[in-house]
Every structure is written in C-alpha cells, then in structure tokens.
Amino acid sequence: MPQHVPNTPVCRDCDGFPVVAITTGTRNRDGSRTTLRTICRACHGTGHTVRRSSLARAGR
C-alpha cells in the first residue's frame, strides 16, 4: 500500500538546495580549497517554504 506524503512546496529562492559551499579561491596548507558554507535566508536551511494556511489557522 503506498505511503501518503504531504506535499510540501520547495523554496523558490534555493530550489530545494538550502545549503551550499562557496570556494574562496585560496587553498589550505594541505592543498584543499577553503570553502564557506551558507544557508538560504528564505527557508533557513530547510529547503521548503512554510504554508501560510498553517500559520493563519489559529483560533476558530
């Protein structure tokens, strides 16, 4: 029997790739590249957007 998975929309700013590594162009002493890890500001690293309907469902 198939499992039902809720349809969570993908973040439109990062297209579902919330964490990226950006190379700075310099190298470490062992020869590896120096990288910076950054996360998407819109989804805060989750890759999905928050549904507005779930936020507005407070009270009656």
Image (spheres, helix red, strand yellow):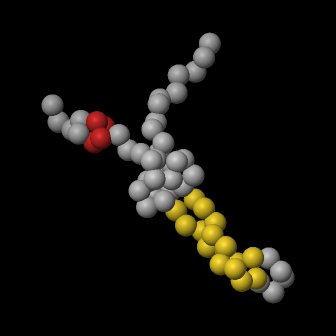
Q: Is residue 28 left or right of 35 when viewed as pictured?
A: right
Q: Position of residue 49 (x, y in %)?
A: 41, 45
Q: Quadrant of residue 1?
A: top right
**Relative height, residue 14 to residue 55 (above, below):** below
Image quadrant for the C terminus? top left
Residue sitting at x 60%, y 62% = 20
Q: Is residue 53 left or right of 45 when viewed as pictured?
A: left
**Relative height, residue 29 to residue 11 (above, below):** below
Query: 49 or 25: nearer the eye?
Result: 25
**Relative height, residue 1 to residue 48 (above, below):** above
Residue sitting at x 45%, y 58% = 44
Q: Is residue 48 left or right of 2 when viewed as pictured?
A: left
**Relative height, residue 35 to residue 43 (above, below):** below
Judged from this view, the residue extending furthest toward the right is 30
Q: Is residue 19 left or right of 12 when viewed as pictured?
A: right
Residue sitting at x 48%, y 42% = 10
Residue sitting at x 52%, y 62% = 39
Q: Where is residue 34 in the image (x, y as percent from the top left)?
A: 70, 78
Judged from this view, the residue extending furthest toward the top is 1
Q: Where is residue 22 in the image (x, y as percent from the top left)?
A: 63, 69
Judged from this view, the residue extending furthest toward the left is 60
Judged from this view, the residue extending furthest toward the bottom is 29
- Numbered disc total: 0
